[in-house]
Image (spheres, helix red, strand yellow):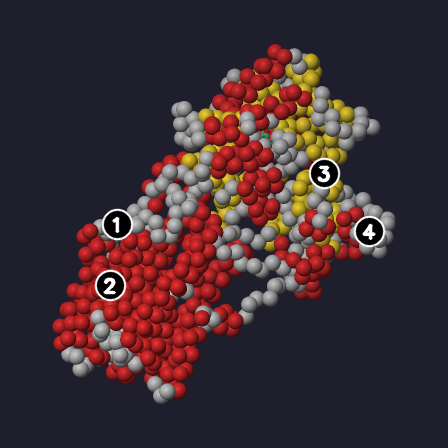
């Protein structure tokens, strides 16, 4: 017998579990031991050795190693060994950087790992999907990815999409009844749901019958490993740039070598010098450092509660010019409290805050109790047509489930209705809420086997479906004037920023067809709830900061237009002349109509998720870089289409998370702002170290080229060139990647996404500084060489020291787009430490006698240092004054 053929009781028996209480902790432990984690066989990790060896696969490095080998064979042991060591150290650094980047990416993966809703020890809770074991009772909701193979025991219009397994993209209805047929394929086992498939509608409960590799997905897992690493646009741009730079560097080095040989230098010497120079000058490590900088930035973002799912988002974030944000839960607290009730044509007020169950009902300042006509009925129906539960923890009440539903439970408690009452009623069918339908219905049967339908939802959706209304004297026909009066009440509530929900009912006969599309018609209107959802405190200032940063914030909500407008006003999001558009208006507009208005629109109300896509497209047509938030399944297309898709860590569904590039751990709008700020900062830092590395390389090449042009000896020997490359490319560049931003990045306009790496004067800065570094190094060499032509080592030591010092001073220049003097050099302690340690290493190489023959150095005098000091400071100081 297979799982789908068994009745639910048999499944429960076989797995020693009941769907009402779930497994016990002890059972879970035993099963974990026996079957392991619920994961598809881990993909093979690239071995550490391979990553290490990869550091040496670069062509020029191989040439260098070959050249060194030859040098060794020719008897130049010391040089050969020194070069080998430097190349090795360089390899190690690259290796550790890559490891670090890898680790932080893995941590990210862990953070955004899918979760499952399980019942254990009679309590529902969320656990990472990998911890699910066979026998676990799990609940799945619309938008979830199913964590394991399950046998359905309860289905509320549950539909799943199984194209990952079957290729069939039409959703499949799921139910709980056993199927006798004994050779069904996965797609026909409609009382089962499978790991990796998606819940597109409804909700359900199931018992796990297979985990990990014992699932259908596990059987085909080997076919779908997908390990290709995505490269970010910036990394791609840099890789392309790298190719050009390689050609340029090779040409220049070839020139150096050629000129050197022409001037009479030994061919072999020039060759080794040339190869070293090429290795030093080719920024082959640039994309790797960028990756490291990006992943370090990603870690900082995690601290600010933003999880980056795609590294490329870090760059794009800095370009965002529009943020389209959900209102409920993102801009507001998502803690709803019923403040007003409209019933029997009268407005009542409810006291109390949050989910605290203390509070009373007042009509014209008089307290009202449950004897008030229809009040208890309305509140009871609100409890029944409901998916949330009210729980208590450490004396504080909180809601599990939809906060809108939770508010109705609290409202009912205030009149004395508790969850006990629900036991007298049986829910026969549920039509779940979604943002498209904007309503939810249940069919209930009471103790006397009387059946009726309860529907609650947005008033403007419900009213057209009502033909009667309930008053103090019972049910009567809903006339146009009644409808007007109700709409009026909705408006007055919405103007006060209240979210409105209408509730209605209809009696059903026992044999009424529950599947008909007309079920939710001919309703009897009962009343309205008006609930407050206060804005999050930090959102108002975050919107203001975004405005100053040239980023427009747009509110998108399924809520009533007046509610949306009131909250937008409250948050200072909607200017005096700003437009508010409603879903029905969007329907009538073509994309080009919308384009015309969209720049002036700040609020979209009563929209469905489908509208979001249209909004994204219109903004993009206008040249905007759009960030779009979402939480439900239907938001996924818009999130995908946007430039920066943002999903909610708490309320978001798996589908939206998968489609997004950024996850907000706290669902908070202000976190988007922090992420953008961080994104801008990271990009600036990347510019800083590109500038530093390339200017250094220009200086290195030029000093050699100039010397050869002037017919002078080599100012630097190969080991020195490699050493400079190692010590300056390493620590100081990394420290720049951790730099604080210059001024407030949120006071500038968004960066143009198409701008090149060298834009905004960066190219000029690199060349001008690089040329000057080359010139001062050459001058230092010339002066020393003229003084003391027999002692070439002395001249080379001076040149070497000047070059290193010039770079270590220049690194501070790179922190600023303006002038080196505009920033406090001690602000970035990493940089200060990096520079100090490079300096220390320099001193060791110059003064420690055992190293002198290896690095071709000699001890320098105070007079030498004064010369070096003046010359090496020159490039930075000079440009510090010109401010260009
Ligand atoms: P948003 O999330 O942008 O506030 P929704 O799509 O969730 O918008 O809600 C739209 C409207 O649907 C609300 O204004 C409310 O009237 C109604 N509504 C919201 N939640 C529920 C629910 N759980 N049951 C019934 N109706 C609801
Ligand atoms: Mg909502």
Query: Judging from the image, what secondary structure is the residue with disc 4 in?
Result: loop
Circle 2: is it few (<14), some (14-19), or many (20+) Cα within 10 Å?
A: many
Helix, strand, or loop for circle 3?
Answer: strand
Residue 694, given in percent of the width and then of the height, sits at 33, 61
Identify the residue position indicated by label 4 in the image.
184
* Rendered location of residue 144, percent (x, y): 63, 46
Residue drawn at x 76%, y 56% is 15
The label nearer to you, 1 versus 4, is: 1
In the picture of the structure, the residue carrying the numbered disc 3 is 157
Q: Relative to 70, is 368 above or below?
A: above
Q: Quadrant of residue 578?
A: top left
Residue labelled with disc 1: 818
Q: Nearer the viewer, residue 731 or 270?
A: 270
Location of residue 626 in the rendering, given as x and y in whole percent from the top left corner: 47, 40
Image coords of residue 710 (percent x, y): 21, 70
Q: Secondary structure at mark 2?
A: helix
List the residue tagged with mark 2: 773
Distance from Cα at disc 4 to Cα at disc 3: 22 Å
| Mark 4 / mark 3, whichever is N-terminal | 3
Mark 1 crowdedness (10 Å alpha carbons): few <14, some 14-19, many ≥20: some
Q: CA distance from mark 3 to mark 2?
A: 72 Å
């Amino acid at each position: 017998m297979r799982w789908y053929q068994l009745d639910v009781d048999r499944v429960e028996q076989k797995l020693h579990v009941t769907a009402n209480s779930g497994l016990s902790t002890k059972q879970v432990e035993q099963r974990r031991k026996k079957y392991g984690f619920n994961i598809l066989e881990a993909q093979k990790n690239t071995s550490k050795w391979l990553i290490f060896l990869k550091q040496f696969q670069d062509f020029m490095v191989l040439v260098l190693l070959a050249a060194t080998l030859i040098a060794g064979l020719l008897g130049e042991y010391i040089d050969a060994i020194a070069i080998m060591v430097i190349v090795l150290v360089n390899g190690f650094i690259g290796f550790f950087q890559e490891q670090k980047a890898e680790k932080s990416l893995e941590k990210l993966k862990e953070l955004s790992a899918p979760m499952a809703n399980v019942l254990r020890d009679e309590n529902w809770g969320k656990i990472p999907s990998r911890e699910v074991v066979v026998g676990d009772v799990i609940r799945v909701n619309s938008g979830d990815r199913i964590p394991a193979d399950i046998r359905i025991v309860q289905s509320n219009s549950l539909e799943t999409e199984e194209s990952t397994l079957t290729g069939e993209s039409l959703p499949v209805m799921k139910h709980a009844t056993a199927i006798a047929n004994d050779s069904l394929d996965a797609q026909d086992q409609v009382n089962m749901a499978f790991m990796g498939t998606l819940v597109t509608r409804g909700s359900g409960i199931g018992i796990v019958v297979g985990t990990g590799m014992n699932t259908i997905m596990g059987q085909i897992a080997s076919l779908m490993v997908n390990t290709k690493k995505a490269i970010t646009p910036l990394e791609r741009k840099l890789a392309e740039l790298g190719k050009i730079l390689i050609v340029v560097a090779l040409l220049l080095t070839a020139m150096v070598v050629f000129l050197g040989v022409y001037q009479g230098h030994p061919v072999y010497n020039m060759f080794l010098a040339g190869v070293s120079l090429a290795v030093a000058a080719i920024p082959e490590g640039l994309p790797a450092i960028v990756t490291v900088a990006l992943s370090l930035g990603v870690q900082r973002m995690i601290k600010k509660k933003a999880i980056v799912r795609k590294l490329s988002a870090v760059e794009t974030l800095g370009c965002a010019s529009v943020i389209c944000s959900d209102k409920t839960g993102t801009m507001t607290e998502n803690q709803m409290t019923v403040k007003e009730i409209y019933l029997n044509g009268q407005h009542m007020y409810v006291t109390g805050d949050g989910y605290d169950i203390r509070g009373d009902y007042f009509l014209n300042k008089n307290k009202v109790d449950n004897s008030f006509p229809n009040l208890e009925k309305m509140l009871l129906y609100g409890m029944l047509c409901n998916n949330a539960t009210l729980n208590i923890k450490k004396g504080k009440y909180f809601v599990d489930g939809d906060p809108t539903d939770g508010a109705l439970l609290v409202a009912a408690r205030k009149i004395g209705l508790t969850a006990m009452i629900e036991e007298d009623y049986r829910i026969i069918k549920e039509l779940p809420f979604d943002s498209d339908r904007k309503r939810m219905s249940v069919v209930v049967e009471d103790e006397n086997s009387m059946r009726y339908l309860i529907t609650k939802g947005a008033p403007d959706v419900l009213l057209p479906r009502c033909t009667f209304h309930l008053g103090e004297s019972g049910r009567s026909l809903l006339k146009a004037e009644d409808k007007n009066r109700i709409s009026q009440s909705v408006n007055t509530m919405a103007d006060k920023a209240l979210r409105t929900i209408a509730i209605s009912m209809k009696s059903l006969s026992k044999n009424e067809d529950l599947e008909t599309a007309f079920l939710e018609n001919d309703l009897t209107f009962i009343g309205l709830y008006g609930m407050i959802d206060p804005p999050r405190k930090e959102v108002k200032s975050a919107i203001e900061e975004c405005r100053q940063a040239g980023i427009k914030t747009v509110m998108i909500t399924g809520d009533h237009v007046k509610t949306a407008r009131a909250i937008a006003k409250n948050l200072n999001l909607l200017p005096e002349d700003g437009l508010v558009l409603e879903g029905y208006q969007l329907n009538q507009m073509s994309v080009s109509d919308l384009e015309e208005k969209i720049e002036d629109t700040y609020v979209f109300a009563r929209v469905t998720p489908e509208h979001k896509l249209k909004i994204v497209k219109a903004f993009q047509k206008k040249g905007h870089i759009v960030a779009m938030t979402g939480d439900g399944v239907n938001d996924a297309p818009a999130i995908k289409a946007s430039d920066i898709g943002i999903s909610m860590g708490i309320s978001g569904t798996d589908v939206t998370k998968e489609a997004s590039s950024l996850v907000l751990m706290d669902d908070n709008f202000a976190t988007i702002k922090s992420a953008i700020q961080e994104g801008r900062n990271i990009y600036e830092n990347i510019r800083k170290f590109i500038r530093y590395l390339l200017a250094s390389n220009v200086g290195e090449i030029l000093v050699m080229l100039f010397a050869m042009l002037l017919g002078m000896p080599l100012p630097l020997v190969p080991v020195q060139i490699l050493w400079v490359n190692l010590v300056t490319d390493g620590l100081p560049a990394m420290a720049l990647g951790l730099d604080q931003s210059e001024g407030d990045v949120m006071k500038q306009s968004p960066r143009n996404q198409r701008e090149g790496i060298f834009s905004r004067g960066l190219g000029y800065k690199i060349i001008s500084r690089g040329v000057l570094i080359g010139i001062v190094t050459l001058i230092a060499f010339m002066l020393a060489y003229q003084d003391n032509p027999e002692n070439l080592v002395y001249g080379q030591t001076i040149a070497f020291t000047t070059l290193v010092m010039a770079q270590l001073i220049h690194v501070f220049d790179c922190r600023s787009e303006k002038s080196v003097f505009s920033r406090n050099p001690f602000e970035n302690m990493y940089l200060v430490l990096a520079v100090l340690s490079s300096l220390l290493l320099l001193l060791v190489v110059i003064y420690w006698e055992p190293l002198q023959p290896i690095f071709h150095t000699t001890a320098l005098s105070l007079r030498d240092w004064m010369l070096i000091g003046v010359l090496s400071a020159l490039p930075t100081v000079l440009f510090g004054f010109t401010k260009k």
